Amino acid sequence: QVQFVESGGGSVQPGGSLRLSCAAPRAILSTYSNYHMGWYRQAPGKQRELVASISPYHITTYTDSVKGRFTISREDGKKRTYLQMNSLKAEDTAVYYCNEVRTPGSWGPGTQVTVSS
């Protein structure tokens, strides 16, 4: 199954920034530009939620809690999707995953984001 690889997480203080990166697996390199990509997150004790998405036409959507703070982007030539996270809050603490939105593949290990003073 298709599995993306996330990176870029870490520990930051409230108000800080992080940039997450998602690499496409070799199996889909030739079709990656057709994928509708999304960043998800799962906080302890909560369900996984879709945070942001970007279509093959670069149309973006965001969940209300991150609008104005997070920016999703993609570089089809590099087969990567990014999530720029600014003005981070404690409630953004979670494991972040990337996956295709319409037909998600298997979930990777994700990347941990911890926001704490």
Image (cartoon, rainbow, N blue to C red):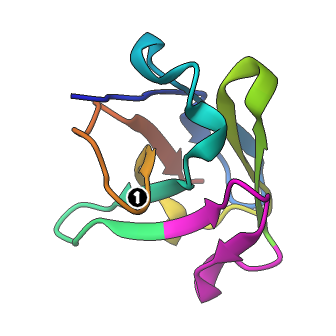
Outermost bottom residue: 64
| Magenta stretch in the rendered image | 51-68
Query: Exactly how many numbered labels are in the figure?
Result: 1
Residue 77: percent from left, percent from top: 79, 22
Instruction: In the rendered view, tell whether residue 34 sits above or below residue 22.
Output: below
Residue sitting nearer the eye, 72 or 91: 72
Q: Quadrant of residue 47?
A: bottom left
Q: Position of residue 100 (x, y in %)?
A: 43, 50
Q: Is residue 33 above or below residue 86?
A: above
Q: Which residue is mark 1?
A: 41
Query: Residue drawn 60% across and 28% down?
Result: 8
Mark 1 Cα shell of 10 Å, populated few (<14), some (14-19), many (≥20): many
Report if residue 21 is visible in the image: no
Picture residue at 22% right of the left edge, 38% below the top: 106
Task: Pick the residue in front: 22 or 115.
Answer: 22
Quarter of the image with the N terminus in it: top left
x 49%, y 47%: residue: 114
**Amino acid marked by disc 1:** Arg
Instruction: Give 100 or 87, whichever is nearer the viewer.
Output: 100
Quadrant in which residue 55 is drawn:
bottom right
Q: Looking at the picture, how far across and down is residue 31, in whole percent?
A: 56, 31
Q: Residue at point 60% right, 45% down?
A: 34
